[in-house]
């Protein structure tokens, strides 16, 4: 029995050692480039799927095995680990770090809550829209970690407001144990929760009792109660707020709801944040790591194809996100709040209960605590908008963009814009410059005047370096598969699918990745499937985008389990929902997303990307591979 327990404890180490040894006969008995590349690919894939080692560490396997087996030279492999997409990510993270540092996202979220009011239906729609908007530009994990504390505070206000109403009326409650959502009935602060993304995904395991998670790496700080949080000194506006995630066990033991309706509201709002973060990540090419991996792999595989950029991706995905957001709102409302939309979505002030009025008053007070918009917030907002405009107008397609003003074409990309604007944020001072008479020369103001909008420390705390290495490992695997001929061999094995129509092939691929991604990390899933799908498309003479784009989107639909991705884990840690709630609601969102993506790729996607023809750039790549 003791030996078995020891083996279970050391199972990851055994997996790391045994898998390469058991697969070693493949390149030894079949000494060819294809067999050697397949060996490296399988070993790396097993490490990713099992997460026996951190995702970033597993991505380094091709860096030493490819040269060892003679698949690629060491300098060729090294060149795959830093690409144009990495520069794009660096620039975006600079702007994201400024947004998080100066609490611009908190102002946006609270303002939208005030616009929606305290009606459950409108509150749900408001938080979903706000989360989607933020997730378009920030990572899904960071967005969820930022918005969930605001949602939790609003939920506490909604429940505790009725307690105060009853106490003020000196009336006896007829409902059992009117306990607020907080363990000690203390009023929570709307201090934002922030996820440090510079640490590994394994740190999130504390939320899920040592279960591995999936997606963008992030970590949470030790759990603190509301009273402990209030007893500590408040962070200055230049410091990152710490993560506050309630313990799942404490929440389950201590949290009670006034009614079943209150419990349903808490479940509905909590789960909607995770789903909205996923929907928002689909909208922009930089919204999630899977889109970035797809873009760089596609550009490497088909360098002559200049069809996918920030603008074309947004034109295709924005209607998908909009439709999916609305349909998901109806689904979540029907599932948890019922079909009485007239009562839960009314904007009339006359129909507001005392409880809702008190809640709105408290939210208004929290928003007023932010004060007037600060100079760093204005600068960050301006750069945020400017970056988006420059991305859209670089090569809009239907009219000449600003890139056409330069003599040499094709030298500037979306990464050029993001890195340039991100660089400027390190130079612009955080204090508004004063050219007239100086004010009182306080030391604090002088120090603030010399500090830029963001510092390198701010950037380091936000930059997901593990994702950078992971993406690089995916590029290395793809490059090795192409140069060794493995991708061509895989494509030839799939000729049996040629009898199926293209839409059926795409649907089967989407269903397959939707199932796999529930248990395997999103970046690992897309890295494994992209080379296979490229070979499949070329073999069947299907436009590769017809398969790659829907699959890339469906990989993000890991919404059914807490271990599906970090946003799911963060939401689950608040204790409002159970596994069965996530499975039931997530299954509906998954089906909604799959149907909408398939409709989109077969309607406006066909005209936008010319999917009804087999493009020249795919033929050229296929001929090169075979040669």
Image: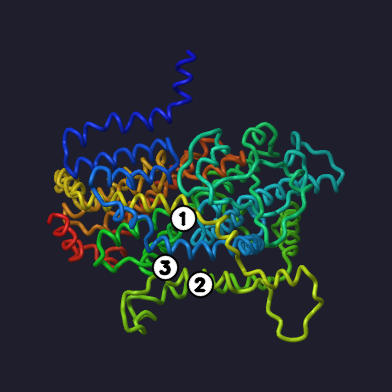
Task: Name the residue carrying label 3.
Answer: 415
Q: How is the image coloured?
A: rainbow
Residue visible at 49% across and 14% down? 2
Q: How far is the residue under mark 3 from the one under mark 2?
A: 10 Å
Q: In which quarter of the image is residue 102?
A: bottom right
Dot 3 or dot 1: first in sequence order is: 1
**Of residues 304 and 495, which is closer to you in this image?**
304
Residue visible at 67% across and 34% down? 250
Residue visible at 33% across and 31% down? 19
Residue 612 showing in the rendered view? yes
Q: How far is the residue under mark 3 from the one under mark 1?
A: 23 Å
- Residue 45 position, x and y percent, is 33, 40
- The disc at residue 421 is 2
Query: Mark 2 falls on what kind of element?
Result: helix
**Is 385 above or below relative to 611?**
below
What is the residue that sits farthest to the top in this orientation? 1
Task: Name the residue carrying label 1.
Answer: 279
Q: In which quarter of the image is residue 28?
A: top left
């Amino acid at each position: 029995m003791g030996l078995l327990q020891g083996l279970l404890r050391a199972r990851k180490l055994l997996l790391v050692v045994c898998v390469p040894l058991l697969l070693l006969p493949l390149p030894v008995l079949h000494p060819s480039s294809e067999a050697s590349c397949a060996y490296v690919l399988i070993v790396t894939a097993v490490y990713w799927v099992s997460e026996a080692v951190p995702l970033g560490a597993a991505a380094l396997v091709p860096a030493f095995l490819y040269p060892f087996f003679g698949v690629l030279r060491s300098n060729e492999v090294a060149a795959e680990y830093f690409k144009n997409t990495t520069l794009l990510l660096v620039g975006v993270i600079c702007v994201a770090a400024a947004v998080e540092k100066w609490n611009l996202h908190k102002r946006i979220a609270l303002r939208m809550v005030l616009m929606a009011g305290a009606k459950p239906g409108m509150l749900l729609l408001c938080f979903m829209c706000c989360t989607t908007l933020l997730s378009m530009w920030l990572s899904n994990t960071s967005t969820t970690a930022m918005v969930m504390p605001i949602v939790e505070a609003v939920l506490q206000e909604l429940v505790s407001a009725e307690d105060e109403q009853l106490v003020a009326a000196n009336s006896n409650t007829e409902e059992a144990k009117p306990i607020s959502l907080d363990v000690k009935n203390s009023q929570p602060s709307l201090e934002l929760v922030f996820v440090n993304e510079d640490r590994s995904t394994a740190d999130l395991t504390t939320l899920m009792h040592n279960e591995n998670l999936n997606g963008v790496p992030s970590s949470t700080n030790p759990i603190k109660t509301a009273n402990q949080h209030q007893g500590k000194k408040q962070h200055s506006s230049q410091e990152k707020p710490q993560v506050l995630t309630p313990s799942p066990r404490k929440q389950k033991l201590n949290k009670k709801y006034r009614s079943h309706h209150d419990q349903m509201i808490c479940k509905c709002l909590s789960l909607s944040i995770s789903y909205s973060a996923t929907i928002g990540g689909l909208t922009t090419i930089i919204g999630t790591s899977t889109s970035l991996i797809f873009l760089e792999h596609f550009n490497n595989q088909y360098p002559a194809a200049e069809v996918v950029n920030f603008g074309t991706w947004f034109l295709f995905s924005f209607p998908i996100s909009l439709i999916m957001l609305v349909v998901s709102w109806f689904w979540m409302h029907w599932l948890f709040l019922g079909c009485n939309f007239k009562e839960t979505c009314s904007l009339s002030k006359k129909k507001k209960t005392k409880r809702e009025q008190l809640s709105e008053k408290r939210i208004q007070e929290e928003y007023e605590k932010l004060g007037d918009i600060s100079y760093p917030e204005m600068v960050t907002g301006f750069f945020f908008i400017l970056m988006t405009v420059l991305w859209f107008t670089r090569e809009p397609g239907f009219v000449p963009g600003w890139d056409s003003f330069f003599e040499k074409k094709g030298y500037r990309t979306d990464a050029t814009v993001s890195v340039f604007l991100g660089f400027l944020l390190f130079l612009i001072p955080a204090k508004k410059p004063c050219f007239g008479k100086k004010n009182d020369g306080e030391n604090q103001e002088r120090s603030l005047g010399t500090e830029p909008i963001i510092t390198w420390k701010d950037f380091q705390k936000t930059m997901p370096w593990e994702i950078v290495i992971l993406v690089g490992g995916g590029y290395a695997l793809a490059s090795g598969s192409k140069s060794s001929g493995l991708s061509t061999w895989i494509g030839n094995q799939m000729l049996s699918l040629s009898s199926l129509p293209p839409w059926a092939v795409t649907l089967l691929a989407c269903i397959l990745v939707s199932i796999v991604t529930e248990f395997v990390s999103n970046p690992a899933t897309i890295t494994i499937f992209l080379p296979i799908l490229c070979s499949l498309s070329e073999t069947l003479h299907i436009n590769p985008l017809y398969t790659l784009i829907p699959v890339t989107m469906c990989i993000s639909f890991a919404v059914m389990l807490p271990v599906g991705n970090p946003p799911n884990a963060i939401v689950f840690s608040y204790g409002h929902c159970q596994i069965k709630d996530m499975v039931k609601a997530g299954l509906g969102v998954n089906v909604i997303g799959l149907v909408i993506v398939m409709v989109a790729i077969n309607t406006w996607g066909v005209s936008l990307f010319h999917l009804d023809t087999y493009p020249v750039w795919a033929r050229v790549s296929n001929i090169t591979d075979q040669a």
